[in-house]
Image (cartoon, grey):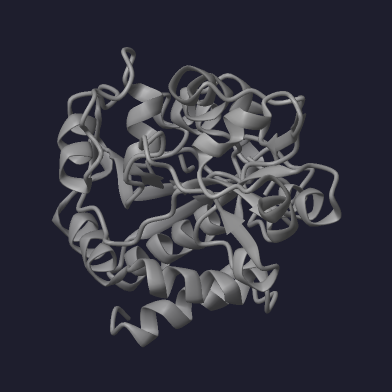
Amino acid sequence: MKSIKIAAAGVALALGLTACGANSDPLSDDAGSASSDTSTVTVGSANFAESELLAEIYSQALEAKGVKVNRKFNIGSRELYIKALEDASIDLLPEYNGALLAYLAKSGVPEGVSSPDAVLAELKKNLPTGTEVLDQSAAEDKDTLTVTSATATKYNLKSIEDLKAINGQLIVGAGAEFQERYQGLKGLESLYGVTFKSFKALDAGGPLTMKALTDGDIQVGNIFSTDSGIKTNNLVVLEDPKNLYTSQNVIPLIRSTANNTTVSGALNAVSAKLTTENLTTYLAKVQVDKQDSATVAKAFLTDNGLV
């Protein structure tokens, strides 16, 4: 996701739809018992709406199969939640194959690796010790560079490549980690030769970035492709002809010690039903209709015969 998918407030972002209070530490002891109880699967998420919704879907799917679940949502960016996975503070979370690969691969994503299957194969070579991925879904949520229709018209912008002609003129907004990631400012400059007037740290594809873009505080925003605001605000997603953003299929990332046939069966069944279209639809119920993620997750599972 969405590289996708991630550190601020709202996929590292400040969203009001969190399972933890905005002022609580989701990894503290009072946020729930740690995953030392091997009969319990501790499910984590990044702190943006889609990640939390997916984590809630995973949680309820497991509970429907009799698995005890501990929720530790709203952790923050990938830098934080991967550390939590590695130190066993959490056992499971939804990820995005391409964004996770880009984060883990020390030498970067190999040239030509962009399709879901190719990304998955490469990802499995780079997973942290003691972790594995289960079946990836067809649902995909990519990072995008998005502009308003007025900006697209003014500068004749159709693709990321077109930004090079106006280097140093526009302000870009995204989560703070966008400054350091290859699938952020570094990759935009090295792959496309694109630079900006300035960078504004907001949230990773969240409401702060969307508001700043529509208000004109920034001219380019890192928005996730499933965000309903792209359509409702008539925004223009710039094409990515050089595939800076590889496939971003939703995939469960889990500690091997927490996995068993019941757990994998429940999560693989979810992945089999997830599509980009239905993920976008159910996410809109959270982002637009302001339903809580637990209610929307239950609706997804019920509608798809998973509970």
Q: How many marks?
A: 0
- Viewer can see residue 36: no
Q: Could you say which quadrant of the image residue 36 lies in? A: top left
Q: Residue furthest top?
A: 107
Nearer the observer, 259 or 7: 7
Q: What residue is shown at x 14% (from left), y 55% (from top)?
A: 261
Q: Could you say which quadrant of the image residue 195 lies in? A: top right
Nearer the observer, 215 or 242: 242
Query: Left or right of 66: which side holds 29?
Result: right
Q: What residue is shown at x 70% (from left), y 74% (from top)?
A: 290
Q: Give coordinates of residue 248: x percent, y percent.
A: 36, 47
Query: Left or right of 143: which side holds 17?
Result: right
Q: Give coordinates of residue 187: x percent, y percent.
A: 48, 23
Vertical relation: 243 (above or below) 71: above
Nearer the observer, 21 or 50: 50
Nearer the observer, 46 or 6: 6
Query: Left or right of 33: which side holds 174?
Result: right
Q: Give coordinates of residue 220: x percent, y percent.
A: 68, 42
Vertical relation: 65 (above or below) 192: below
Q: What residue is shown at x 27% (from left), y 72% (from top)?
A: 273
Query: Which quarter of the rendered picture does the C terminus lie within?
Result: bottom left
- Viewer can see residue 269: yes
Q: What residue is shown at x 35% (from left), y 23% (from top)?
A: 104
